[in-house]
Image (tube, grey):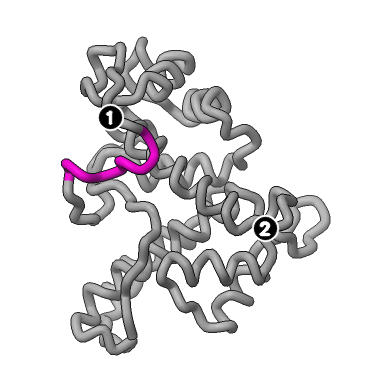
């Protein structure tokens, strides 16, 4: 089994070993300077502006409602509350008890979102604003995840309309959440499968530690 995912990276604080000098150059150029002292000089001005527009310049952090405002300002309108909380959990500073993001964490999130958005737009071939099962399969395949049909069906069947209870195609925030979960669990599994065989032996504690954060309710 080959592991060669090209999915956007999760934050280093979430267990990813990244090259700081090369990370996220795809989403935002680094030749424009941020305007806030809280941000590094390489931060794109749009990221700084959206952070400050949501009130982050007052406290130095964005909470749930402020993050929703900042993302809407950046063009990510309509993201579900569940996904907002999921992103806060993924990107918050390790050891931080509060679900909030500082400038560094928010910058990481913005750059990652830009890459996931580009991937979604590329494989939303009918421009419906939603991704069906075939489009989802092709997107994961491009990212390096050759998921079995049974797993894809499980992902699709887990997406349902809150009002009707019927399964639905994946809009961007649902695709984002599923993609991050698949990437994170794959990275965790790889640590236990150094020979890339597709098999691993896990203790109960290890298995629970891997899975619980992603099945916890963020509603």
**Residue at 37% over, 32% down:** 100
* Residue 44 in view: yes
Can you identify the residue that label 1 sits on? Answer: 30
* Left or right: 135 as drawn, with respect to 2: right
Examine the image and state in which quarter residue 138 appears: bottom right
Where is residue 26? Give x, y as percent. 36, 43
Where is residue 55? Give x, y as percent. 44, 14
Rendered image: mark on residue 125: 2
Indicate the secondary structure of the residue bearing disc 2.
loop
Toward the viewer: 143 or 98? Answer: 143
Indicate the secondary structure of the residue bearing disc 1.
loop
Residue 91 highlighted magenta (yes or no): no
The region drawn magenta spans: 20-28
Question: How would you classify the magenta stretch by its main secondary structure?
Answer: loop
* Left or right: 85 as drawn, with respect to 56: right
Query: Do the residues under discs 2 and 1 have CB atoms within 8 angstroms?
Result: no
Q: Residues within 10 Å of mark 2 (few under 14, many from 20)?
A: few
Where is residue 150? Give x, y as percent. 58, 83
Q: Which of marks 1 and 2 precedes in the sequence?
A: 1
Residue 185's place in the image compared with 150, above or below, is above
* Residue 65 in view: no
Residue 114's place in the image compared with 151, above or below, is above
The quadrant of the rendering that contains the N terminus is bottom left
Separation (CA) of disc 2 from disc 1? 30 Å
Toward the viewer: 201 or 190? Answer: 190
**Residue at 37% over, 67% down:** 185
Examine the image and state in which quarter residue 205 appears: bottom left
């Amino acid at each position: 089994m080959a592991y060669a995912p090209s999915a956007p990276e999760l934050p280093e604080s979430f267990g990813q070993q990244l090259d700081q000098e090369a990370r996220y150059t795809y989403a935002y150029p680094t030749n424009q300077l941020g305007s806030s002292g809280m941000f590094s000089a390489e931060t794109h001005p749009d990221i700084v502006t959206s952070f400050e527009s949501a009130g982050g310049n007052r406290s130095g952090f964005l909470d749930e409602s402020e993050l929703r405002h900042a993302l809407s300002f950046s063009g990510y309108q309509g993201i579900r509350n569940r996904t907002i909380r999921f992103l806060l959990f993924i990107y918050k500073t390790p050891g931080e008890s509060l679900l909030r993001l500082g400038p560094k964490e928010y910058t990481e999130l913005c750059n990652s979102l830009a890459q996931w958005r580009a991937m979604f737009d590329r494989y939303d071939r009918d421009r419906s604003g939603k991704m069906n099962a075939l489009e989802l399969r092709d997107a994961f395949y491009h990212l390096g995840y050759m998921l079995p049909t049974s797993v894809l069906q499980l992902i699709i069947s887990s997406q349902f309309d809150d009002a009707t209870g019927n399964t639905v195609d994946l809009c961007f925030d649902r695709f984002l959440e599923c993609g991050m979960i698949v990437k994170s669990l794959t990275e965790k599994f790889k640590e236990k499968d150094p020979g890339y065989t597709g098999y691993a032996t896990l203790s109960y504690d290890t298995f629970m530690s891997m899975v619980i954060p992603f099945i916890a309710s963020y509603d």
